[in-house]
Amino acid sequence: MEMQHDPDLQFKLAYSDSERIDTGIKTRARGQWASKVEFILAVAGQIIGLGNVWRFPYLCYKNGGGVFFIPYMVFLFACGIPLFLMETALGQYTSQGSVTCWRKICPLFEGLGYGSQVVIFYSSAYYIIILAWAFFYLFSSFSGELPWASCRNWWNSENCVEFDQMGGTRNLSFMENASSPVKEFWERRVLNITGSVNELGSLRWELALCLLLAWIICYFCVWKGVKSTGKVVYFTATFPYVMLLVLLIRGITLPGAIDGITFYLYPNPARLADPQVWMDAGTQIFYSYALCIGCLTALGSYNKYNNNCYKDCVYLCLLNSGTSFVSGFAIFSVLGFMAFEQGVDISTVAESGPGLAFIAYPRAVAMMPLSQLWSICFFLMIILLGLDSEFVGLESLMTAITDMNSNYFLQGHRRKLFLLLICVGCFLIGLLMVTEGGLYIFQLFDYYSCSGMTLLLFAIAQSICIGWFYGADHLYENIVDMIGYRPLTLMKYCWKYITPIVCIGTFVFSLVKFTPLKFNNTFEYPWWGYAAGCWFTLSSTLMVPIWMIYVVLITPESRTRNPKVAGSSLVPAGIVGGGSECTALSPTFNTTTEVPLSKAPCSPEPQGTPNCSPGAAAKNGCPLLRVCVHGVCVCSLLCVCTLDGINAEH
């Protein structure tokens, strides 16, 4: 008798009669990835974003060139891969979004799910502004001459000075306030920025339309859940690599490219003694791997139960870091060309963040032959990299919300309407950031809402929950059950000891080095700006302790005495392989109708040693033979188990 493994079976066994629903229908309504490729591309689209292009190369050159890879790899293997695997595996094992996942693992830490979704909401509201800017530059690239290549435009000031491609820049020292055309295009044409944060100015309607376009695209990428997201990522996650390859080939063929690449990678071992280098490496891992914001949990929840999440995570982490490394060649080869043409040191043109994407790189592109073509390629890459991260984050937020009340949201068009409500709300918030003073608001969001300290606090809490409450060994065995073999044992020790210790050390250092935000490192925000920043940070991080207090106050003593027990009573965490430890009496369920049939022992046991773990049973074409739920044995009437190579039916 041959049957297919039912990924929802563990929940059928764990839920009480009143809580059980038709999980087969629920799974179909919730959706699953149509193939492993969709999952890989969706995660790649989320984690491989703008930070790989405009942050990592700059950090590498600033922090000692090639030696920066030493602290980077230490953090990758001590924190990056273990946390990446933890979050993905939890989603796959529970088939739940980030809120309900933690609710089932350990209710005491459910605040982690709420806090991470607050971060995603803030990120969704401000991150998409970058796409609005990129769309503006992309549309401006379809012109006879790039508008930031000269000073012959209506927005240019009297202080605008063009750069001479063959003879270097003109001597700007004779003009005290001289500025370049690319900088004036950014500040006077795109932003039309005001003098201070107290002057928001009027709405930049062109940017508002670009923002609306970005939100419309994001909405239709997510509106059907993974059914639409899984198809869109085939283009959005792969085409940026085509653009990156094109820009890389073009960059390394330019004069001065070798100097730029040397500047990018030239090692300076003395920099390893600077704690800031290690801090930058750690924060880059958290930023670029989308850790602790619930996205990986949500994406993993749409996997089949027996998907090899361990192998997927290792490959995705290596792909992410490899993309960052290669991006450095594409960026610094072009910056080397610009420094060569202008006759200046490359350190004067190297920038990170929006300064690289909207000032430094466009200036370099304007100096190339066929500048419009290369500008279109670059901004298409920026848009697709940002678009992936935006709509996958939005999908994660919707997953968390719908899983909290799936009976309501999975009926009719309620999910689509609620998604529309979120998009409209974020669009209205975003309008503040496309005013003439919007850049000031944008930097407040960017600096405080998804700060490194917030992510570090979440990482510490996650590691403590899994390592000491749920049990590192427990999660390890869950992964073994799903993939059918034992991952590197080091993972258990990372979850329990190494990751929390490293994160605590990094958090303390970042707290000591913390400085309030200053616009362009000079302009101080008014008191309400810093108050808003504190709100962005505390509104997410305080979710964890507030929820802990709430659970302790409303939960009976028997459930709070041992958090492991409380967590296990709500999660298929109790489901481990069968065997001699599963000898107690328990209800026997018909896995098709989910109706309790009778209380019966798991006997008579077949002769031999049955390989009855869920993963092994699935490989042999049956759902489950015997599983432990809450420490007792549960038998299924529809199980087939392998005995010495022979299928034996219970």
Image: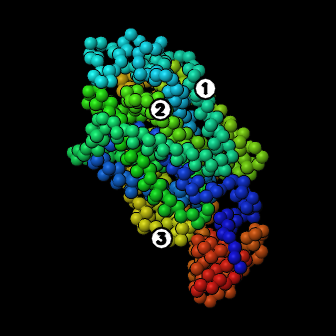
Q: Position of residue 347 (x, y in %)?
A: 28, 32
Query: What colouring method underlies this structural image?
Result: rainbow
First reached walking from the N terminus: tag 1 or tag 3: 1
Of helix, strand and loop, which one carries label 1?
helix
Image-based side of 512 in relation to 7, left or right: left
Q: Amino acid at mark 2?
A: Leu
Q: Badge 2 is on which residue?
A: 373
Q: Badge 1 is on which residue?
A: 209
Residue at image location 47% in from the left, 70% down from the top? 486
- Where the N terminus falls, by quadrant? bottom right
Q: CA distance from mark 2 to mark 3?
A: 50 Å
Q: Amino acid at mark 1?
A: Leu
Of helix, strand and loop, which one carries label 2?
helix
Q: Position of residue 51 (x, y in %)?
A: 44, 41
- Where the C terminus falls, by quadrant? bottom right
Q: Which mark is residue 486?
A: 3
**Can the viewer see residue 445?**
no
Label 1: few (<14), some or many (≥20) within 10 Å?
some
| Closer-to-camera residue (573/25) | 25
Q: CA distance from mark 1 to mark 2?
A: 24 Å
**Can the viewer see residue 184?**
yes
Please report contact status of discs 1 and 3: CB closer than 8 Å, yes or no.
no
Residue at image location 32% in from the left, 21% down from the top? 164
